[in-house]
Image: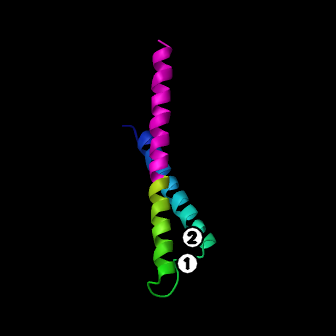
Amino acid sequence: MSYKTLWFEGLSDAVGFVGGALLGFWLGRLLGLDIFNDGYTNSAIGGIVLVGLGGGLGLQGVRRWRLAKAASAAKTSNQDR
C-alpha cells in the first residue's frame, strides 16, 4: 500500500468516528442525556452509550463507503478494457 492510500484510510476513519460520536452526543443532548453529569447517573451512562454507538457506526459507515468506492473503481477499470 502506498502512503497516500494509508493516509486517506486513516483520515477517513478518524472523520467517520469523530463525526459519528458527535452525532451520538448531540442526539443524546436532544433526548436529555448528558455525558458530563456528576457521577454515573442513568443520564450519563445513556449519553456515553450513544456516543460510543455513534462513533462505531460512523467508522463502519466510512469503511463501507471506501469498499463501495473501491468496488466501483474496479468495475469501471474492468469495463474500460
Q: Which region is colored magenta?
A: 59-81
Residue at the far bottom in the pictured view: 38
Residue type at mark 1: give it. Asp
Image coloring type: rainbow
Q: Is residue 78 above or below residue 64?
A: above
Classify the position of the N terminus by image quarter. Answer: top left
Q: Residues within 10 Å of mark 2 (few under 14, many from 20)?
A: many
Where is mark 1, residue-wise?
34
Please identify the dominant SS of the magenta region.
helix
**Among all residues in the image, which is located at the extreme right?**
30
**Residue under the point 52% across and 84% down:** 37
Q: Height in image: 1 above or below 36?
A: above
Q: How far across and down, in percent of the image, does residue 8 sit?
A: 47, 44
Q: Residue furthest left?
A: 1
Q: Residue at x 47, y 54 (%)?
A: 57
Report the residue at 50% width, 34% height from top: 69
Q: Inspect the image, locate mark 2, and give the three-letter code of the amino acid beneath it.
A: Gly
User: Label 1's element?
Assistant: loop
Q: Position of residue 20 (x, y in %)?
A: 53, 58
Task: Answer with mark 1 or mark 2, whichever residue precedes in sequence.
Answer: 2
Residue 22 image-quadrant placement: bottom right
Q: Residue at position x 49%, y 66% from top?
A: 51
Compared to 74, does 49 lie above or below? below
In front: 66, or 3? 66
Q: In this figure, what is the number of numbered marks?
A: 2
Give me the C-alpha separation between circle 1 and circle 2. 7 Å
Say which of 12 and 19 sits in front. 19
Question: Is residue 79 magenta-colored?
Answer: yes
In the rendered image of this protein, does residue 48 appear above or below residue 64?
Answer: below
1 and 2 marks in contact (CB < 8 Å): yes
Q: Is residue 80 magenta?
A: yes
Residue underneath mark 2: 28
